[in-house]
Amino acid sequence: MHFYPPIEVKNDRIKSIRNGHPWIYSRGIKKVPKNITNGAICTVIDEKNQFLAIGLYNEHSSIRIRIISWKDEKINKSFFKQRISQLKTFKEKLLPTNTDSYRVVFGESDLLPGLIVDKYHHVFVMQIHTLGMDQFREGIVEAIKGIFQPSTIYERSDLGIRRKEGLKTQPVGLLFGEDKEEVLIKENNLNFWVNFQKGQKTGFFLDQRENRNLTAQFCQNKKVLNCFSYSGGFSIYALHGGAKSVTSVDISKPALEYAKRNFEANRMNVKKNQFLAEDVFDILKNLKKGDYDLIILDPPSFAKKREQVKNAIKAYTTINSKALEKLPLGGLLISSSCTTHIDELTFIKILHQSSVNARCFIRLVANTSQPFDHAYNLSFPEGRYLKFFILEKFYEL
């Protein structure tokens, strides 16, 4: 006797499920109960009625079932409290000293499909991507309250993907505690203001924490150009690492105002550095060779959908080609991509083509991915999205 309505999957799907992949597509399903509703918890069984997993069902999505447990257990408030508590223990053991912010829940990779929870000091911001997870909002909030004693829990489920799940709303607002817009966080002993109500994603790019720290090691006495700078994360680290000067470029004026505030929060001189509210493509085009010793490219995702990949490759190639063209011999390019639909090998090919376009050779100085609090489960390679390269322009043709 199972806790939830059984959904039978085809025999050729069993291996994938047992090996830990959390998605079951419509083509993998053999039999569905007539009375099951979208968003319902279901028991995944094989053709011999043997238990395989517990999942969340939704016929609106091509991913019909998202697995939430490989044990035959009840999915309730206690389940969420236990799962999130385990994540806290694991991630806080690895968190750098003088750092109070990290990703608590990273969706499927943390076995909570469709859920993102970010901790910004004592403020928690959550996003719910899927219909199945949407029904557990109250239990998730209670779990966060019980485990962390937060001052604020805020929802930022302003996500277009919810429409594909059959969800008609995109909830944004206070779920618990003090109603405020921003919070000052500490990351590797540096300070950052985070606007979690209006900022990009949940307010800050926590996934670049270790890459920002790595970048600082290469900035001594360098003139640095930080493109797509947002609120100045890489800019702050560059100056912390001894850069001569930093120019921060972002199309958003409000983002640059936060960058200036972050300079001030770290007692860095705003007047000795530049903040340009301009298009990065135009900036790179109009640079003179040698204006900067180190250029950082950390753009937003250029492809939200697979059909946008071709244009994304073109955009990545354009900005990297221009950056390499304008760097002096011995200059450094730091290039990153968060586009899930472009894998690491494709991005390496983009970087190589960019060097061909710029008539130069580049060599790898460092190559990393996302940090432990965004770690991807090896059973779910789709969770790997961040590519980060530090490259030297060492030869010109």
Image: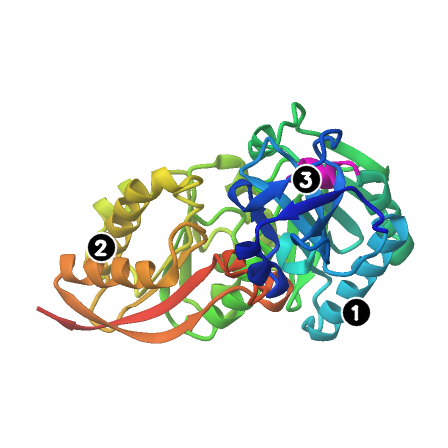
Position of residue 393 measured from the top left corner of the image (x, y, whole percent): 23, 70
Position of residue 164 measured from the top left corner of the image (x, y, whole percent): 56, 31
Relative vertical location of residue 219 with respect to residue 164 in this rendering, above or below: below
**Is label 3 in contact with label 2 (beta carbons under 8 Å)?**
no
Q: Tell me the CA gap for discs 3 and 2.
A: 45 Å
Q: Is residue 98 left or right of residue 258?
A: right
Q: Is residue 268 visible?
A: no
Within 10 angstroms of label 1, few (less than 14), some, or many (20 or more) residues? few
Check disc 1 and report its element: helix, strand or loop.
helix
Q: Give the labeled residue for mark 1.
A: 89
Q: Name which residue lies at 28% across and 43% down.
A: 310
Q: Quadrant of residue 18?
A: bottom right
Q: Tell me the CA gap for discs 1 and 2.
A: 43 Å
Within 10 angstroms of label 2, few (less than 14), some, or many (20 or more) residues? many
Q: Give the labeled residue for mark 2.
A: 321
Position of residue 282 measured from the top left corner of the image (x, y, whole percent): 27, 40
Check disc 2 and report its element: helix, strand or loop.
helix
Determine the residue located farthest toward the left in the rendered image.
397
Task: Quadrant for the C terminus, please.
Answer: bottom left
Query: Type of residue at label 1?
Result: Thr
Q: Answer with mark 1 or mark 2, whichever residue precedes in sequence.
A: 1
Q: Quadrant of residue 394?
A: bottom left
Query: Type of residue at label 3?
Result: Tyr
Q: Residue 56 magenta-drawn?
A: no
Q: Give the labeled residue for mark 3.
A: 57
Determine the residue located farthest toward the front in the rendered image.
48
Q: Name which residue lies at 79% across and 34% down.
A: 174
Q: Name which residue lies at 78% across and 61% down.
A: 71
Relative vertical location of residue 54 with respect to residue 334 in this rendering, above or below: above
Relative vertical location of residue 240 with respect to residue 278 in this rendering, above or below: below
Viewer-proximal residue among 146 and 138:
138
Position of residue 110 measured from the top left corner of the image (x, y, whole percent): 67, 59
